[in-house]
Image (tube, rainbow, N blue to C red):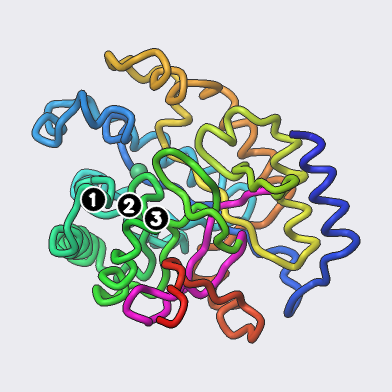
Amino acid sequence: MVRAVVEERRRCDGSTPVRGPTLPTLNCLSIDVEEYFQCAAFAGYVSRAQWPSMERRAAPFVERLATMLQRHGSRATFFVLGWNVPELAPLLRQLVRQGHEIACHGDGHEHLARLSPQELRDDLRAARARIEDTLGVSPRGYRAPTFSVTRATAWALDVILQEGFQYDASIFPIRHDRYGVPGAPDGPFWAITPAGARILEFPPLTVGWRFMRLPVGGGGYLRLLPGAVVRHCLAARQRRGEPAMIYVHPWELDPGQPRLPVGRASQWRHRVNLHTVEGKLEALLREFHFEPAVTVLEHVRARADLPVFSVLPRLPGA
Ligand SMILES: [Zn+2]
């Protein structure tokens, strides 16, 4: 992994020209505001009908993240699960007052492969209504649960666009068993939808290594990798004049969360290195500046050289 970073730095320092205006300080830290039991790993064990009876633990960790951000003079994008909005309303209003962006993480946290276009539309409308009615702000960005915009669910981009979202942050440009669009650009890009429209996409931070693209910017990857490796990757991205997207969940700051009866692999994936997240975020916030995704994208959207990528590859002659 360290070699991957060295390779990336060499590539960035040497052969890759800086594209467009230099953006040395604009990065995005995003927080998917969900409870630990809403995580996809537990979907088979905790149904949505059981959510109201589960212990809520997210609020103090969202508050702690906001305090850290304030201490370092950075602002973030909070992708809020609509279902959680009423309960977290006072805290979310405080985030709005502090200049953070409230964006949308859907309402029921269903992987898009399990939804029809109409069900996604209903889910987005429910979440938007809760955010707008409760907080008085309109979400402009969307992140699908489990980064589940893939080639198989590319239809979702048209629904997201039609439902009034200006950008999406759901495409992970890697190969993975549950998500990912291998070959997608690693920085912000225009995604061409199956209907031929386009929407701004802001993928999480990854690093190129040989013929592979490896995730580094959040979740289990951020927890497993040494903090220095993540910071090296972010610095390399900055030298290219490209913004980076980091993501984290409130439950990742909560090593005391209850253990749910899932298999050992899921348990490990969910809990590994939870105790390291706060320190790693502190170090990132000390070294780099973060702004909401909507602010970062405002700076890059006018770039003539912003990559354009069709999520569904066009068939010859089509
Ligand atoms: Zn989520």
Mark 2–mark 3 contact, CB under 8 Å? no
Indicate whether 310 appears above or below 107: below
Please give the residue where the numbered disc 2 appears in the rendered image: 80
* Amino acid type for the residue under numbered disc 2: Val
Residues at circles 1 and 2 in contact by the CB criterion of under 8 Å: yes
**Which mark is first along the chain, 1 or 3?**
1
3 or 1: mark nearer the eye? 3
Q: Quadrant of the N terminus?
A: top right
* Dot 2: element: strand
Tag on residue 150? 3
The disc at residue 85 is: 1
Pick whichever of labels 2 and 3 is earlier in the sequence.
2
Task: Give residue 173's position: percent from left, percent from top.
Answer: 54, 54
Position of residue 54 relative to residue 178, above or below, is above
x 47%, y 76%: residue: 316
Find residue 231 and report its image quarter: top right
Q: Could you tell me residue 81's position as x and y percent?
A: 28, 49
Q: Which residues are magenta?
A: 186-207
Amino acid type of the residue that numbered disc 1 sits on in the rendered structure: Val
Q: Count how many numbered circles sit on residues in the image.
A: 3
In the picture, measured across the screen, residue 281 lies left or right of residue 252, that is: right
